Image (spheres, helix red, strand yellow):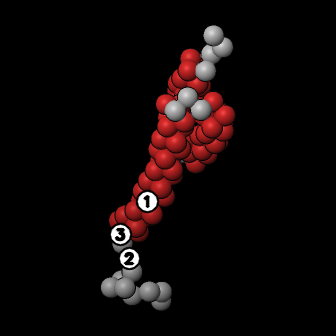
Amino acid sequence: MGGIPLSVKKSSAEKRYAQSEVRRLRNKAVKSEVHTFVRKYMDAVQKKDQKLAEEALKVLNSELDNAGRKGVMKANAVSRKKSRMARLYNVTFAAK
């Protein structure tokens, strides 16, 4: 028969667990990054700093798109968050 002895072979369950752990950590890092950019954006909006908020919104949208593309966040969740952040920007900095 040949090949690797059964006692040395890794079970498929162990392999799947290892794969899922790697994915979980990668997804956690992406989500954490998104949360960080949301926090920076919200701080800029609360300080009423329009220029900083605009830059933060651009970066946040880019990060959200990345998370959606990687499958970490669902497409509708990404759209919803982007929409809410844009609406917050427009309400806060509307020309009066």
For label 1, the residue is: 25
| Sequence-first disc among 2 and 1 | 2
- Note whether 26 is above or below 92 in the view shown: below
- Judging from the image, what secondary structure is the residue with disc 1 in? helix
- Judging from the image, what secondary structure is the residue with disc 2 in? loop
- Note whether 73 is above or below 29 in the view shown: above
Amino acid on which the number 3 mark rests in the picture:
Glu
- Judging from the image, what secondary structure is the residue with disc 3 in? helix
Residue at 62 percent of width and 16 percent of height: 94
For label 3, the residue is: 14
Amino acid on which the number 1 mark rests in the picture:
Leu
Within 10 Å of disc 1 (Cα), the crowding (few <14, some 14-19, many 20+) is few
Within 10 Å of disc 3 (Cα), the crowding (few <14, some 14-19, many 20+) is few
Q: Say which of marks 2 and 1 sits in front.
A: 1
The quarter holding residue 87 reads top right
Residue 65 visible from this viewpoint: no
Mark 2–mark 3 Cα distance, whole angstroms, equals 7 Å
Residue 69: x and y in percent read 61, 44
Mark 3–mark 1 Cα distance, whole angstroms, equals 17 Å
Residue at 44 percent of width and 86 percent of height: 4
For label 2, the residue is: 10
